[in-house]
Structures are given as structure tokens and as C-alpha cells.
Image (tube, rainbow, N blue to C red):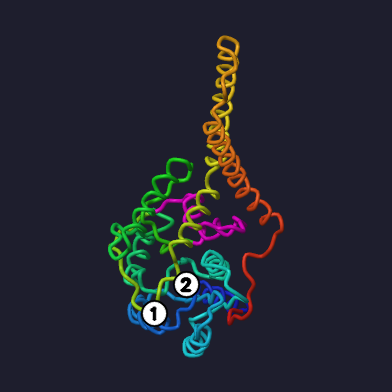
């Protein structure tokens, strides 16, 4: 008689587990996105939350030290919708830190990373989830097949970056790849296991492996606001990727140094032979000055390359946190 309530409780608990909807966490970094946030939230409510009823959702928005009213809007949205969670940094730590914070606090069985400028179409989330449910893949990532609307020089440099890094790195980089992707929990856990201070997520996502399916789409321009990625910031980000996923610059400096040393030795032998046979003619000061400047420039370049790697080692061993949280409504 006493066993019957226990059996009932166990069956009830099992039934609750079976009825539980899979949770999807959507991580979205925000920096000065005051005009975009209401538009983005409305689009997510209309296109994603209301149409994908078989999933539970949490929307994690990270305020990356915004200087406008982004945080105020996040507070208002969080009061209206309990699915909306936010994290506010003490200052601007960058998009990579914001993505890391979102992944670290995500509780979902599936985790999606996207931007709030609607250049990452919310309509694709349903397709991502469907492919994860029906195909043998652990991650569904997106890539742009066109760069329509971008300045031509920016597009040319982007393509050059992918060509270069794929030649010098063991990690494969997909041209046009976006941070917009849906991952299973196992992929997210693997990404979080990499405690790198200088993070280059495009490389980290590829380095951890797992089966990745790709969705292609044409470039979509920002709906409102302005892009936060200047040409200089993109250049620094590209250098970050090269230094983080390749030692080729160090090997190049070694190779060039060896070639220059060999040429200098050959030149010295030639000058000795000439002096022994024809005497010591007047030295060519312009050529000597040019060679000295060339060697000095190469030495400074080699020191700069070494300095980039040493600086990253220095920052890593200090073990500073990737971000500092100032405010959040996440328990």
C-alpha cells in the first residue's frame, strides 16, 4: 500500500521529464544598440518565440559597456518578458568577451549566437533547429555568399585574410563565415573549456571540431544604427586571428633572417676576393646605407612579430578575467 504513492511520484517525474521542451538559449552581444533593440526583440517575438512553440527559449543579451540607453531598454524588456536575461559589463570588453559571457551563462540544450542588427536573419533559427533534430550534426553555422553593400576594399581585404590564414594555419576557416550559429550543448562546453584571454571565436568554433553543417545566405544590411566595426578594428581582429591560430609569422621571420644572413656572408666573401685581386676600391656609401636601412627595418619587423606573441603570453599568464559583470538578472 505504501509503495503506490512512490510509484505514482516516480511516474509523474518521468512524465514531466518526457514532457519537458528542449531549451534554446540565444546569445546576443549589444554595444550602443539603443535604436535596434526594440526592433530586434519584436522580430524575435514574432518570428521565433511565437512560431517555435515546441521549444522553450531564453534570450541572453550582453550589454558590452554601452554609452547610450541600451541598458535601460534591456531592463524594461526584462520586466515585460521573463525569457529575456541580460548581463551588463563594467566597461567595454569587446564582442568576443560578450559572446563568452553569454555562452557561459546559457542553460539551453541548444545555444545560438547572433547579432541584434538583424544581419543575422531570425528566420534561419527554425531551419537550424530542424537540421540539428534531423541530421547528424552538432552545429549549424552560417556563411555569406555575397558581400553586397560592403565597401569593395573591405571585401577585398576580407577575402585576402581568408586566403592567407588558410595557407598558414592548420585550422580551416570558411570564407564569409558568421558568428551566427546554433550549437548543441557539447559544442558549447568544448568552447568554454578554452580559457583564452585573447579570443578569436571564428577560429575557436572551427578548432574544437564536431560535425558542422553550413547554411548560406546573401548579405543583409543593418536595419538601424551604425556598424561598430571600423576598417582598423577589422584589421586588428584579423591580426588577432593570425597570431592566435598560426606560428607562420615567426617561421617567416626565421626564414627571412636566415636568407639575409646567407646573402651577407656571400657578399662578404665576394668583397674579400675583390679586395685581394683588385685592391680596395672606394666603398659605395649609398648602397651600404640602403642595405643598413633594409636590415634595420627587417630586425624591427621581426622584433614586432615576436612582440605580438610575447604580449599575448604576458596577458594570458596575468590571468585577468575575460570580462567583469556589473549587473545582471540571471540567477
Mark identifier at residue 21: none
Q: Tell me where residue 176 appears, x and y as whole percent.
A: 36, 56
Name the quarter where the N terminus is drawn.
Answer: bottom right
Vertical side of 303 occupied by 184: above or below: below
Does any portion of residue 23 appear in the rendered image?
no
Query: Which quadrant does the C terminus fall into?
Result: bottom right
Q: Label 2, secondary structure: give it.
A: strand
Indicate yes or no whether the magenta region holds residue 283. Answer: no
Q: How far across and down, in percent of the image, does residue 220 sit? A: 30, 68
Q: Marks 2 and 1: CB-CB under 8 Å?
A: yes
- Crowdedness of circle 1 by 10 Å Cα count: few (<14), some, many (20+)? some
Determine whether 286 is above or below 74 in the image.
Answer: above
Does dot 1 land on a helix, a strand or a loop? Answer: helix
**Can the viewer see residue 209 in this picture?**
yes
Q: Tell me the distance, in whole angstroms, between the alpha carbons under discs 2 and 1.
A: 10 Å
- Residue, x 45% and y 46% (percent of image)? 165
Residue corresponding to mark 2:
28
Around disc 2, counting alpha carbons within 10 Å, would you say few (fewer than 14), some (14 to 19), or many (20 or more)? many
Residue 217's spot in the image, x, y percent? 29, 62
Q: Earlier in the sequence, mark 2 or mark 1?
A: 2
Give left or right: position of 151 versus 255.
left
Q: Residue furthest top?
A: 277
Looking at the picture, how far across and down is residue 249, in whole percent? 53, 42
Residue placed most toward the observer, 225 or 122: 225
> Residue at coordinates 50% horizontally, 86% vertically from top-left?
69
Q: Report the span colored magenta.
A: 185-212
Quarter of the image holding residue 289?
Answer: top right
Number of marks in picture: 2
* Residue at x-position 37% and y-position 54%: 213
Asked whether 238 or 136 is in front, the reply is: 238
Q: Which residue is mark 1?
A: 40
Q: Is 203 within the magenta?
A: yes
Amino acid at each position: 500500500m505504501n509503495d503506490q504513492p512512490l510509484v505514482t511520484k516516480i511516474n509523474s517525474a518521468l512524465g514531466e521529464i518526457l514532457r519537458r521542451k528542449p531549451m534554446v538559449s540565444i546569445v546576443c552581444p549589444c554595444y550602443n544598440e539603443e535604436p535596434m533593440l526594440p526592433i530586434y526583440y519584436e522580430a524575435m517575438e514574432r518570428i521565433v518565440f511565437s512560431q517555435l512553440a515546441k521549444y522553450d527559449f531564453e534570450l541572453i543579451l550582453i550589454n558590452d559597456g554601452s554609452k547610450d540607453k541600451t541598458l535601460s531598454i534591456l531592463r524594461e524588456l526584462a520586466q515585460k518578458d521573463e525569457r529575456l536575461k541580460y548581463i551588463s559589463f563594467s566597461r567595454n570588453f569587446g564582442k568576443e568577451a560578450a559572446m563568452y559571457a553569454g555562452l557561459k551563462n546559457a542553460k539551453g540544450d541548444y545555444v545560438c549566437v547572433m547579432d541584434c542588427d538583424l544581419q543575422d536573419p531570425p528566420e534561419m533559427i527554425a531551419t537550424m533547429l530542424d537540421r540539428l533534430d534531423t541530421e547528424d550534426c552538432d552545429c549549424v553555422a552560417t556563411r555569406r555568399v555575397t558581400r553586397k553593400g560592403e565597401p569593395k576594399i573591405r571585401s577585398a581585404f576580407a577575402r585576402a585574410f581568408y586566403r592567407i590564414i588558410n595557407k598558414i594555419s592548420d585550422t580551416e576557416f570558411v570564407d564569409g563565415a558568421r558568428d551566427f550559429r546554433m550549437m548543441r550543448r557539447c559544442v558549447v562546453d568544448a568552447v568554454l573549456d578554452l580559457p583564452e584571454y585573447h579570443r578569436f571565436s571564428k577560429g575557436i568554433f572551427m578548432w574544437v571540431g564536431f560535425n558542422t553543417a553550413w547554411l548560406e545566405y546573401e548579405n543583409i544590411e543593418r536595419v538601424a544604427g551604425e556598424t561598430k566595426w571600423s576598417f582598423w578594428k577589422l584589421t586588428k581582429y584579423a591580426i588577432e586571428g593570425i597570431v592566435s591560430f598560426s606560428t607562420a609569422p615567426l617561421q617567416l621571420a626565421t626564414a627571412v633572417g636566415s636568407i639575409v644572413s646567407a646573402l651577407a656572408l656571400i657578399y662578404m666573401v665576394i668583397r674579400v676576393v675583390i679586395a685581394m685581386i683588385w685592391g680596395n676600391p672606394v666603398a659605395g656609401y649609398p648602397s651600404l646605407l640602403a642595405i643598413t636601412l633594409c636590415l634595420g627595418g627587417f630586425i624591427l619587423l621581426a622584433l614586432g612579430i615576436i612582440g605580438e606573441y610575447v604580449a599575448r603570453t604576458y596577458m594570458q599568464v596575468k590571468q585577468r578575467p575575460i570580462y567583469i559583470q556589473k549587473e545582471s538578472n540571471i540567477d
